[in-house]
């Protein structure tokens, strides 16, 4: 097993470090430098098919569901098709409206999660077209769907998903771009801007992996706390959900993610002296609003670690600690911001002496309903 960990102490930290490669492998051959074509060999949707689609459902569980929430933002923004994201175990029981004009995207690392497969089957029965985003070649999801998007993350051993999540995010961007180009919602210039930014992501993730000092400091100071809050707006809110899940899964600390604008409607009552708050502030147009939210919790005694893009130094006036992310366009920040959140969870769990790779009560793949 030591050999499989390639010199790392745990599979999780090894897999966190494999992300630049996983992202690159998932993009290469699909998003091509200097080419305006998006190549998706296993997706056969034509522009006529896409014009016929009036609704997309993204259905998944756990971390894959969180990738779906980012997917909703991205696909709606790029392709202007309404998207709903559903937890697979809820989907079937709410009598969803599915027909031949529905496209379902199931997201599943293993491709074997029982609830996700059940949702896929239900959708097919009602005439929907299904794309499976999965990391396992020949998995049930891949076999049963009409179209496939393989995430090339390689085998993920740690129960807490890291590299599968970032490649699922990449799949959401690529599918969003693909739909937008096919249905005529995106000009070639717009495509080129996003493509060129995407191609730089692996290098930017690599750079982020080198910056561990602030995160380790955070873990040293805060690992004994019982509760932590994650706040963000827009795409940052989606990433906050995944950050909180990672912390819960491996450190057993109660972590809650909230849309920062909802603070006043409940969670602010729980903010008191010394409580750690993880605040994401990467969304340009929402930056000032996040700074106000951070002030609100600091006034009530919270200790804030903030994540912002390089250059947004105003954040230092309000947050106790700041981690800067390499600059990119607002749409793509989830790929960058989740990485330090994964590391933060990892260091907190290690400092607490938890079994990082095999957290209690959790399984890598849930094949029963
Ligand atoms: C389990 C795993 C999670 C995973 C979820 C969905 O809960 O512990 O890491 O996100 O299942 O799994 P899937 O294979 O469908 O992505």
Image (spheres, rainbow, N blue to C red):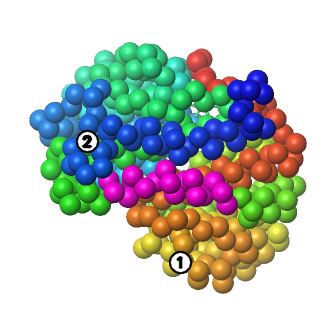
Residue 310 locus on image (x, y percent): 54, 72
Q: Position of residue 189 (x, y in %)?
A: 20, 60
Rendered view: 311 above or below 95: below
Under tag 1, what secondary structure? loop
Residue 57 versus residue 324 in the image, above or below: above
x and y percent of residue 116 in the render?
48, 26
Q: Nearer the viewer, residue 4 or 38?
A: 4
Q: What is the C-alpha distance between the residues marked 1 and 2?
A: 32 Å
Image quarter where the C terminus lies is top right
- First in sequence: mark 1 vs mark 2: 2
Tell me what residue is drawn at x 37 percent, y 16 percent.
144
Which residue is farthest left?
Answer: 48
Q: Is mark 2 within 8 Å of ligand 1?
A: no
Ligand 1 - quadrant of the structure image? top right
Which residue lies at the image location 44% right of the left edge and 37% below the top edge? Answer: 25
Q: Are marks 1 and 2 in contact (CB under 8 Å)?
A: no
| For residue 161, above or below residue 259 | above
**What residue is pinned by disc 1?**
311
| Residue 107 in sight | no
SS under mark 2: loop
Depth order, front residue of 91/220: 220
Helix, strand or loop for the magenta stretch, by majority: helix
Packing grade of label 2 (10 A; few <14, some 14-19, many >=20) is some
Q: Is residue 36 visible?
A: yes
The residue under the point 26% across, 57% down is: 192
- Number of the label disc, if any, that sits on residue 144: none
Q: Nearer the viewer, residue 157 or 94?
A: 157
Occupied quadrant, residue 260: bottom right
Could you say where residue 96 lies in the image, as x and y percent from the top left? 36, 32
For residue 38, the mark is 2
Residue 259 belongs to magenta span? no
Residues rendered magenta in the picture: 195-211
């Amino acid at each position: 097993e030591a050999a499989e960990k390639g010199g790392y102490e745990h599979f999780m930290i090894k897999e966190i470090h494999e992300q630049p490669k996983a992202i690159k492998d998932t993009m290469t051959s699909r998003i091509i430098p200097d080419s305006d074509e998006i190549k998706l060999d296993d997706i056969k949707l034509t522009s006529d098919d896409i014009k016929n689609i009036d609704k997309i459902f993204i259905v998944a569980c756990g971390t894959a569901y969180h990738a779906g929430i980012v997917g909703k933002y991205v696909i709606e923004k790029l392709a202007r098709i309404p998207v709903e994201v559903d937890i697979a175990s809820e989907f079937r029981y709410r009598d969803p409206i599915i027909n031949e004009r529905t496209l379902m995207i199931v997201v599943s690392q293993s491709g074997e999660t029982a609830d996700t497969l059940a949702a896929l089957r239900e959708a097919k029965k009602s005439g929907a077209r299904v794309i499976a985003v999965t990391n396992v070649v020949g998995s049930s999801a891949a076999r049963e769907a009409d179209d496939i998007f393989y995430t090339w993350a390689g085998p993920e051993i740690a129960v807490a998903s890291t590299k599968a999540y970032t490649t699922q995010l990449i799949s959401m961007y690529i599918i969003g771009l693909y739909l937008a180009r096919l249905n005529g919602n995106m000009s070639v210039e717009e495509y080129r801007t996003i493509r060129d930014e995407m191609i730089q992501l692996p290098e930017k993730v690599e750079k982020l992996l080198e910056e561990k000092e602030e995160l380790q400091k955070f873990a040293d100071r805060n690992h004994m706390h019982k509760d932590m809050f994650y706040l963000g707006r827009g795409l940052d809110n989606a990433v906050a959900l995944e950050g909180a899940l990672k912390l819960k899964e491996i450190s057993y600390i109660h972590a809650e993610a909230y849309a920062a604008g909802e603070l006043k409607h409940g969670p602010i009552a729980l903010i008191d002296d010394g409580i750690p708050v993880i605040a994401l502030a990467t969304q340009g147009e929402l930056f000032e609003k996040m700074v106000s939210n951070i002030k609100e919790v600091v006034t009530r005694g919270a200790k804030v670690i903030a994540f912002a893009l390089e250059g947004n130094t105003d954040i230092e006036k309000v947050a106790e600690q700041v981690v800067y992310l390499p600059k990119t366009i607002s749409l793509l920040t989830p790929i960058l911001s989740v990485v330090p959140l994964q590391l933060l969870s990892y260091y907190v769990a290690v400092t607490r002496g938890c079994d990082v790779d095999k957290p209690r009560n959790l399984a890598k793949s849930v094949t029963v309903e």
